[in-house]
Image: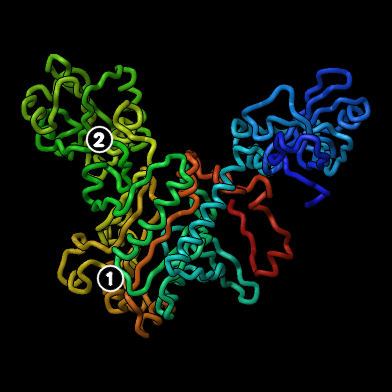
Amino acid sequence: MTQGRTHTCGELRLSDAGKTVTLAGWMENVREVGANLAFVVLRDFYGTTQIVIESEEMMQVIKPINRESTIAVTGVVRERTSKNPKLATGEIEVVPEKIEVLGRCRYNSLPFEINRSKEADENQRLKYRYLDLRNPEVKKNIILRCNVVADLRRSMTEHGFLEITTPILTSSSPEGARDYLVPARNHPGKFYALPQAPQQFKQLLMTSGFDRYFQIAPCFRDEDARADRSPGEFYQLDMEMAFASQDDVFAVLEDVLPPIFTKYGKYKTASAAPFRRISYRDAMDLYGSDKPDLRIDLELTDATEVLADCGFEPFAGQVVKAVVVPNFAKTRKFIDKLCAEAEMLSGGKAYWFRLDESGELVGGISKFVAEHKDAVVEKLGLTKGCFVALAAGKYNAAVKTAGVLRKLLGAQVEGHMDAERYEFCWIVDFPMYEIGEESGELEFCHNPFSMPQGGMQALNEKDPLDIYAYQYDLVCNGVELSSGAVRNHDPEIMIRAFELVGLGEDDVKAKFPAMYNAFCYGAPPHAGIAPGVDRMVMLLAGEDSIREVIPFPMNKNAQDLMMGAPSTVDQKQLDDVHIAIVTKD
């Protein structure tokens, strides 16, 4: 034990009374109650112990020590007169014979109170993250993360997967986000890229003859922060299986994840296998999202047939989606706030009306609905007391706004959300292609390496917008944990798939040379997925921000305030890697 420490600050019990012990930790607090009487709280990784100062000698030692200094205390354990049942060590205290300062805190005040650091400004917390992590409430999330990762590793190994690390310095490839580039000192004008994911490497492992691969993989993407996405880097449980189908991948994760969520989750109920499977189109039609929160019992209803021509101009010629809430007893103030929040989150307008207890249509746009009352009541299945939230526009816009309304109503209206559980589902049958909003041209909808359903025949004979991919997402409580796919391992099918978006064989060979060439040497069918570790732990901990479960996260602007990154470098470092900084006027 370091510093002669005989016990930790969370270890001593009443049975230890009478023993002489040595503890070491941070001096969390000092409470003086008399000339020679004080109570000191000593904290280490494992817990806290009360130290009682009862002599002038020990008082003179403790007085000049600032809080959060590290000290070693040697003394005798005794039973506390006033016990604290909230503490594991609440039945005992230590009377010191010797106090030694191991690491002095040189500041009289702290940036924030350690045990209340979660209430502090986030940038202050990140700048002084080493102090923030001293808070047991913050530290427990990192401990949770460690335990979850250890169990994931154990489970994947038990399922026959080998943990194989893949390169961090690699080549730039178009995978959907901006690369972090690293200049190559020995190759002027050329750059490595940090991997957005080990996608190509894990597929190459399959072509190399490995059957089951996994790793807790670091991924690097230069993208903006969100509550469920950390800028810069993140970690995922990356896995790939040879000679595997979509069902094989599902079976592994349906066996691995529920025990983890049941064991470590804030909620002790998690979906059992098999998880519900929902097509992408059904998810959008019923929930207005491809990551639906199935804890909410509300669904979207298509009201286009009965409301598109009701005389309300925003509905004219548009898709109209409705969310019906029975027995609605909220105020007009609540409704106005709901509509404003939905507009802010979705960018689309929200509308509403009610069928009151007398069976009359009231409020919102009810006067436009009145002429079609019977048809609307029948189509939407309305009963007295129903509230109807509405969204309109082109299909994607209408379902997006309606989906936001569904989520807000489910969370804010009592009785429509079974919150304390983990509800998993698979979203399947994603479109292979879509028309790009900016380009107006045909583009890959998701992963260009996915196998099209129907293979070459579908690519040659079907309208590209009618082709589905063996692409799937794993969703839990409205959070997308991961995307995966059955991979396109056939070079001919791969070339044809890229031809439809205007890229020829030469483009494929140039952009993905290693993978294309490897597939030409006989690749097995393979499939994989990569659940996000950070998002998983965020759900398990019941946190709203992913930064709460990352040891040293960046802030929303992709800055490490503690280390001062990104930072400037000196001219010699730039010269070594052949970089010149050009400042725009």
Q: Are marks 2 and 1 in contact (CB under 8 Å)?
A: no
Nearest to the observer: residue 71 or residue 74 = 74
Q: Residue at x 84, y 36 (%)?
A: 75
How far from the left and from the top, in percent, is residue 432? Answer: 26, 62
Q: Quadrant of residue 581?
A: bottom right
Q: Residue at x 31, y 53 (%)?
A: 273
Marks 2 and 1 sit apart, C-alpha to C-alpha, by 38 Å
Q: Amino acid at mark 1?
A: Ala
Q: Residue at x 41, y 54 (%)?
A: 257
Count residues near mark 1 (Cα–Cα under 10 Å), then give few for <14, some for 14-19, many for 20+.
Answer: many
Q: Residue at x 22, y 42 (%)?
A: 286
For marks 2 and 1, give the one nearer the viewer.
2
Count residues near mark 2 (Cα–Cα under 10 Å), then give few for <14, some for 14-19, many for 20+.
Answer: many
How far from the left and from the top, in percent, is residue 38? Answer: 82, 24
Structure colour scheme: rainbow
Left or right of 393 on screen, residue 36: right
Left or right of 12 on screen, residue 204: left
How far from the left and from the top, in percent, is residue 490? Answer: 30, 77
Badge 2 marks a residue whose secondary structure is loop
Marks 2 and 1, the one that precedes in the sequence: 2
Left or right of 249 on screen, residue 188: right
User: For the view shown, which residue lies furthest in the right direction?
Assistant: 57
Numbered circle sitting on residue 298 = 2
Q: Amino acid at mark 2?
A: Leu
What residue is disc 1 on? 497
Badge 1 marks a residue whose secondary structure is helix
